[in-house]
Image (spheres, helix red, strand yellow):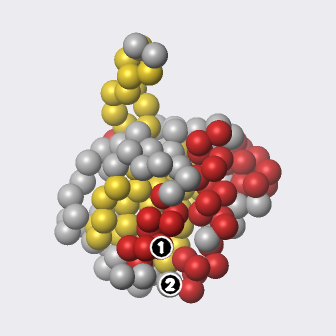
Amino acid sequence: MLEVGTKAPEFTLPDQDGNPVSLSDFLGKKVVLYFYPRDNTPGCTRQACAFAGAFAQFKALNTVVIGVSKDSTASHRKFADKYTLPFTLLSDPELTVLQAYGVWQEKKMYGKVSMGVVRSTYLIDEQGMIQAVMPKVKPDTNAAQILELLNQ
């Protein structure tokens, strides 16, 4: 995973509507960049809904929330509609950004080893520098942890 104090890797990925979104679009704002394994799974849904529930607080703190997974834009659109998610979801089926941010890793589940997204969150400052790195976050407390950091 990337280090605090380093420049966040620039990227452009399609959002849930197929529009290109770049990290540099958000210079001047803080960015919560959270990586999650899959749309419509229990943990990912709880995490997304927690961010949605705290969205007004993030907005008040000049902070945008962006979720990234390898799901398709169509899957993201359905997920966002189903749970009324007010933030951007980016599709990375080629794993470019997932790998650049070090969240595509070997995982062990029920004794099987496979590659997948390790649920992780980065807080990026207004100049595009990494302010916080949170590997292996818990879906239920991730949004609250970030708000706590932002309010320090």
At 34% from the left edge and 49% from the top edge, which residue is drawn? 135
Q: Are marks 1 and 2 in contact (CB under 8 Å)?
A: yes
As rendered, which of 72 and 39 lies closer to the eye?
Answer: 39
Side of 38 relative to 30 (left or right): right
Farthest residue in the right direction?
A: 82
Residue 125 rendering spot, x and y as whole percentages? 34, 76
Structural distance between the alpha carbons of marks 1 and 2: 9 Å
Q: How many other residues sit within 10 Å of disc 2, few (<14), some (14-19) or many (≥20)?
A: some
Residue 20 can be seen in this image = yes
As rendered, which of 3 and 43 lies closer to the eye?
Answer: 43
As rendered, which of 103 and 146 lies closer to the eye?
Answer: 146
Q: Is mark 2 on a helix, strand or loop?
A: loop
Residue 13 can be seen in this image = no
When the figure is inspected, residue 18 is found, relative to residue 26, above or below; the finding is above
Q: How many other residues sit within 10 Å of disc 1, few (<14), some (14-19) or many (≥20)?
A: some
At 37% from the left edge and 27% from the top edge, which residue is drawn? 107
Q: Name the residue under label 2.
A: 61
Side of 120 relative to 131 (left or right): right
The quadrant in which the C terminus is found is: bottom left
At 31% from the left edge and 79% from the top edge, which residue is drawn? 127
Q: Mark 1 points at which residue?
A: 147
When the figure is inspected, residue 101 is found, relative to residue 93, above or below; the finding is below
Query: What amino acid is labelled 2 in the image?
Result: Leu
- Say whether disc 1 or disc 2 marks the residue closer to the N-terminus: 2
Query: What amino acid is labelled 1 in the image?
Result: Leu
Residue 6 rendering spot, x and y as whole percentages? 20, 65
- Quadrant of the image occupied by residue 48: bottom right
At 41% from the left edge and 56% from the top edge, which residue is drawn? 121
Residue 79 rendering spot, x and y as whole percentages? 72, 48
